[in-house]
Image (spheres, grey):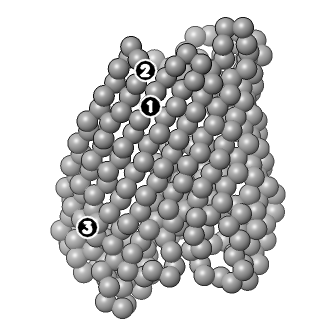
């Protein structure tokens, strides 16, 4: 397998402007093509090499009272798989992510921010093209949603990043990613004291496409409320305590499958040291 990456970046610290291009080529022989057969089409056969191209464009600008970041990514190429209809299965996927921040000003203890974006999803009706894009698993917009596997159907079309068949919703953790969805996540942080911050985030998400073709499928993934208490006992040491509650939308029922959709919640605590 051969991976080639090229990065061109502009970073002006005086004006707070950033821009750049990331370009990646990934190629393999037929023998070294490591894509799991069940990741895209369970009935497909591996008859060729992997050959894909990823292009990312990013932009950022910072002012004293406002900051914005924007990145778009496009994935195209050949998986090396052939469907039962003798079609070469190709990639044609995209994602866009944006962040805005209103930093706390000198006389204020409040900070406002928002994340929003989209990631295309694989359509069950197009057997020769995989439109599913999976964002990096380290990019989080919520504590539960897009972070932990949920539901009984692959609504987010992320099975390509879950090659181990022994892992599922019940025995895996923190291995999900954003895919086949649009999301909006506004947040507000309050500086409680010199060492303590409180942050709350509200996340709403919808499916981009119907991945199962189950009749009556909704696009509503639901709404999540995250609360976080951040304590900094000393410089470069952070202790975070989180509570996340997901009110699942009708999409998790998967239409006529009528799966259960119960309220989900999680509690987490973590510490970090910055060097």
| Residue underneath mark 1 | 60
Residue 124: give x, y in percent of width and height.
51, 79
Secondary element under disc 2, as helix, strand or loop, is loop
Side of 130 relative to 54 (left or right): right
Residue 131: give x, y in percent of width and height.
44, 68
Secondary element under disc 1, as helix, strand or loop, is strand
Q: CA distance from mark 2 to mark 1?
A: 8 Å
Q: Residue at left 32%, top 63%?
A: 76
Q: Is there a contact, CB below 8 Å, between mark 2 and mark 1?
A: yes
Q: CA distance from mark 1 to mark 3?
A: 33 Å
Q: Is there a contact, CB below 8 Å, between mark 2 and mark 3?
A: no
Q: CA distance from mark 2 to mark 3?
A: 39 Å
Residue 165 visible here = yes
Q: Quadrant of residue 12?
A: top left
The quadrant of the rendering that contains the N terminus is bottom left
Residue placed most toward the observer, 141 or 261: 141
The local crowd at label 3, few if under 14, some if 14 to 19, many if 20 or more residues have their Cα within 10 Å, is many
| Residue underneath mark 2 | 16
Residue placed most toward the observer, 103 or 83: 103
Front: mark 2 or 3: 2
Secondary element under disc 3, as helix, strand or loop, is loop
């Amino acid at each position: 397998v051969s991976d080639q990456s090229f990065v061109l970046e502009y970073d002006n610290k005086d004006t707070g402007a950033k821009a750049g291009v990331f370009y990646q080529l990934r190629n393999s022989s037929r023998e070294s093509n490591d894509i799991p057969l069940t990741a895209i089409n369970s009935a497909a056969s591996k008859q060729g090499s992997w050959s894909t191209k990823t292009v990312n464009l990013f932009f950022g600008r910072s002012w004293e009272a406002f900051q914005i970041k924007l990145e778009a990514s496009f994935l195209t190429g050949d998986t090396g798989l052939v469907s039962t209809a003798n079609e070469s299965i190709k990639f044609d996927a995209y994602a866009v992510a944006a962040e805005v921040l209103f930093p706390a000003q000198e006389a204020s203890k409040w900070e406002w921010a928002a994340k929003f974006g989209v990631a295309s999803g694989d359509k069950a009706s197009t057997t020769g093209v995989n439109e599913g894009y999976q964002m990096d698993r380290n990019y989080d917009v919520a504590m539960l949603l897009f972070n932990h596997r949920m539901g009984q159907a692959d609504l987010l079309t992320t099975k390509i990043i879950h090659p181990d068949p022994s892992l599922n919703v019940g025995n895996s953790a923190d291995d999900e990613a954003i895919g086949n969805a649009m999301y909006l996540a506004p947040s507000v942080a309050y500086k409680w004291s010199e060492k303590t911050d409180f942050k709350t985030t509200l996340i709403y998400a919808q499916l981009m496409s119907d991945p199962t073709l189950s009749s009556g499928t909704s696009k509503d993934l639901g709404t999540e409320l995250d609360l976080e208490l951040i304590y900094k006992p000393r410089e470069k040491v952070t202790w975070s305590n989180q509570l996340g509650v997901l009110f699942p939308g009708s999409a998790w029922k998967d239409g006529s499958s009528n799966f259960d959709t119960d309220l989900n919640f999680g509690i987490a605590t973590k510490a970090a040291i910055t060097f």
